[in-house]
Amino acid sequence: MLTPSDNLRSLLAELQLCDAQQLAACEPEVRRLAGDLPGFDSCWLDVLTAHRLLTPWQARCLQSSDPLEMRQGPYRLREPLGQRTWQAETTDRSRLLVLSQLKADDLHATRLLMERAQLLVESVWEAGAAVSSAVCLPREFLLHEHGDGGWLASPSIPGWQLDELLIR
């Protein structure tokens, strides 16, 4: 039976991207794709992407020098939406959200930005029932694990992105 490299298997498990059963289900297609060659990780990533277990961005990220950057707190980045903004998901894939990275040019400005973001989230929580669920406001603030910024988490609203609406 073909299997991905130990490194790729451990990353997929650690990031909770797929389990052993899902890998086994992909194995026949990897075997067909690889032909007489070994089942290289690139073949596995192509098949996992085709099965929608990974996004193309996640597949590229898994081949980068720091694939664990994909995990931010309790969330996993899915794909970039813009500058410093990503679509993310919970590790059980039950909820999509948007994570916006907060980071300024210097440490003082970054700390000020983080304090204001925390105040914004607290204000949204305090407003509670007064704010309609149809209004998309940041619901959570996460510190970056390296301490050099943070993330604002907002609900993801399905639909077209602005660049898809622009007419040229």
Image: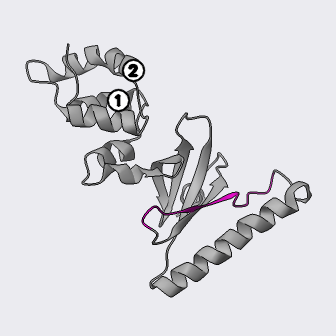
- Secondary structure beneath dot 2 equals helix
Q: Is residue 68 magenta?
A: no
Numbered tag placed on residue 141 in the rendering: none
**Quadrant the N terminus occupies:** top left
Residue drawn 62% across the image and 57% down it = 153
Q: Identify the secondary structure beneath mark 1.
A: helix
- Say whether residue 38 is left or right of residue 3: left
Q: Does 137 sit above or below residue 35?
A: below
In percent of width and height, residue 61 lies at 32, 49
Main secondary structure found in the magenta portion: loop
* Foreground of the two, 6 or 36: 6
Residue 124, horizontal then vertical, whole percent: 79, 63
Residue highlighted by disc 1 = 48
Residue at position x 60%, y 57% in the image = 165
Which sits in the foreground, 96 or 114?
Answer: 114
Residue furthest to the left in view is 36
Q: Residues within 10 Å of mark 2 (few under 14, many from 20)?
A: few
Question: x and y percent of residue 22 in the render?
Answer: 39, 20
Labelled pair 2, 1 in contact (Cβ < 8 Å): yes
| 145 in the magenta segment | yes
Q: Amino acid at mark 2?
A: Gln
Quarter location, residue 25: top left
Which region shows up in magenta? 134-146
Q: Is 162 on the left-hand or right-hand side of 57?
A: right
Q: Where does residue 97 sit, x and y in percent of width and height?
A: 61, 49
Residue 10 visible to the viewer: yes
Q: Amino acid at mark 1?
A: Leu
What is the total number of numbered labels drawn onto the structure image?
A: 2
Query: Would you call the spot at circle 1 few (<14 residues within 10 Å), some (14-19), or many (20 or more)?
Result: many
Q: CA distance from mark 2 to mark 1?
A: 9 Å
Residue under label 2, please give it: 22
